[in-house]
């Protein structure tokens, strides 16, 4: 059955004060763990914060079983007292960081009337205000949305939606865009970058440009609940508020899905508590990673099928004009890592309708990476790098 609306949520994406971001992080990590199993030996990247933000915007408009399913799966409810303000303060803290830009947008069919309560909730939690769009001209609407995304990702994602993504049934597009550009606190010297073989998850080996840096790093060795050994090394960006966490198993034949399934906000807090400053030489591939995801099937597996079904979806807090459901959840992520630092952008759309100590850490085999905001605990981006050929 066709849905008669589209929720579009773009973003890179986070209930006591400390627990809102923890619960959003846990939800995003569960989605990534599911993706890691689906993608197996391929590259994939996600913005946990972006996805959680987009679905939270939809959650504000949900009622009945749809609201219960969303709050159960996500682990929090923005409809509870005090939660919208916490969401707003969290976004303010992130947006105040050097190199981080975040924006929220609401594109609504010009003839559809939004409930006043929903308008107020969006403004309070996300500082988002409705913009009228003529969805009777879908291709023109695609251009308007793509221009908005490009503008809020510094041109990194110029064409978020492909032609034909919207239809005459589209009623609402919720947007959250995040862009990050950070310089390493200590840059890699390009003169030390050398070609080296990278051993892919599928057993093949391909050449990569391997960057090298000798410095003091926060480093630790850990074990999953299943007994798999792995290490974590932190590479800070200028300002020290943001860093990249690099996670790799000791044994080369361990799939990254084993590590991703062990991730949680509590696990990351454990890393932070136990990492120690040590002198190491880090060898890290220079890489680009692009991911375009339709997250509908993943979210259905996580118990959110109700909101995609026109017969069962309940978004009556958004409008009483007509029945709405979500038709797609899309996210696009682009990551570039080089000697100077990292550029990253993401868009998410929900459419309605112990071993011996080693001196050198060489990431010449599959690894996870997380771009992490230390003051709040928010994960802006997470990805698995399995194959340099498929970027």
Image (cartoon, grey):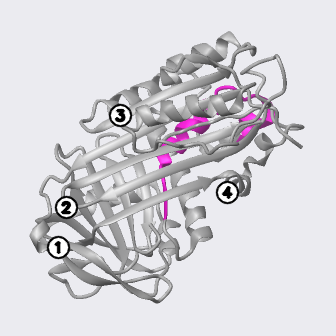
x 71%, y 27%: residue = 137
Answer left or right for 111 relative to 282.
Answer: right
Return the residue at label 2: 339
Q: Residues within 10 Å of mark 3 (few under 14, many from 20)?
A: some
x 62%, y 45%: residue = 162
Residue 228 drawn at (x, y percent): 43, 80
Label 3 vs 4, first from the N-terminus: 3
Q: Tell me the tag on residue 101.
A: 3
Q: Which residues are magenta?
A: 44-69
Return the residue at label 4: 298
Q: Is residue 159 above or below residue 231?
A: above
Camera-near label (3 vs 1) is 1
Please name whichever residue, 353 or 221, is drawn nearer the observer in this view of the structure. Answer: 353
Camera-near label (2 vs 4) is 2
User: Disc 3 versus disc 2: distance between alpha carbons?
Assistant: 22 Å
Label 1 vs 2, first from the N-terminus: 1
Element on which disc 2 rests = loop
Camera-near label (3 vs 2) is 2
Return the residue at label 1: 193
Q: Is residue 167 above or below residue 342?
A: above
Residue 155 visible at all: yes
Camera-near label (3 vs 4) is 3
Element on which disc 1 rests = loop
Residue 372 drawn at (x, y percent): 34, 50
- Answer whether labels 3 and 4 touch (C-beta < 8 Å): no
Q: Is residue 361 above or below residue 22?
A: below
Q: Residues within 10 Å of mark 4 (few under 14, many from 20)?
A: some
Label 2 vs 4, first from the N-terminus: 4
């Amino acid at each position: 059955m066709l849905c008669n609306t589209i929720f579009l949520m773009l973003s890179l994406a986070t209930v006591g004060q400390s627990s809102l971001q923890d619960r959003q992080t846990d939800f995003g990590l569960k989605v990534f763990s599911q993706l890691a199993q689906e993608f197996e030996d391929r590259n994939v990247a996600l913005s946990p914060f972006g996805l959680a933000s987009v679905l939270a915007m939809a959650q504000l408009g949900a009622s009945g079983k749809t609201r219960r399913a969303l709050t159960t799966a996500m682990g929090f409810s923005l409809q509870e007292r005090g939660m919208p303000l916490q969401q707003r303060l969290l976004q303010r803290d992130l947006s105040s960081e050097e190199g981080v830009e975040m924006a929220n947008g609401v594109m609504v069919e010009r003839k559809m009337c939004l409930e006043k309560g929903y308008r107020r909730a969006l403004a309070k939690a996300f500082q988002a205000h409705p913009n009228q769009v003529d969805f009777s001209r879908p291709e023109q609407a695609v251009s308007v949305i793509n221009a908005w995304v490009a503008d809020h990702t510094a041109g990194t994602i110029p064409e978020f939606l492909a032609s034909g993504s919207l239809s005459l049934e589209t009623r609402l597009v919720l947007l959250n865009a995040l862009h990050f550009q950070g310089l390493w606190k200590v840059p890699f010297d390009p003169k030390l970058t050398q070609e080296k073989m990278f051993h892919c998850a599928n057993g093949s080996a391909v050449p990569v440009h391997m960057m090298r840096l000798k410095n003091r790093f926060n480093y630790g060795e850990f074990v999953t609940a299943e007994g798999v050994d792995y290490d974590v090394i932190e590479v800070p960006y200028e300002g020290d508020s943001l860093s990249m966490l690099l996670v790799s198993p000791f044994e080369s034949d361990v799939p990254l899905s084993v590590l991703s399934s062990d991730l949680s906000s509590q696990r990351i807090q454990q890393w932070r508590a136990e990492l120690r400053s040590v002198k190491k030489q880090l060898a890290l591939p220079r890489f680009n990673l692009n991911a375009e995801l339709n997250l509908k099937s993943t979210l259905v597996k996580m118990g959110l099928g109700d909101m995609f079904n026109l017969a069962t979806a309940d978004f009556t807090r958004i409008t009483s004009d007509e029945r709405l459901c979500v038709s797609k959840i899309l996210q696009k992520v682009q990551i570039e890592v080089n000697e100077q630092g990292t550029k990253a952008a993401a868009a998410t759309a929900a459419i309605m309708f112990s071993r011996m100590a080693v001196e050198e850490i060489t990431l010449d085999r599959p690894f996870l990476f997380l771009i992490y905001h230390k003051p709040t605990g928010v994960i802006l981006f997470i990805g698995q790098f399995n194959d340099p050929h498929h970027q």
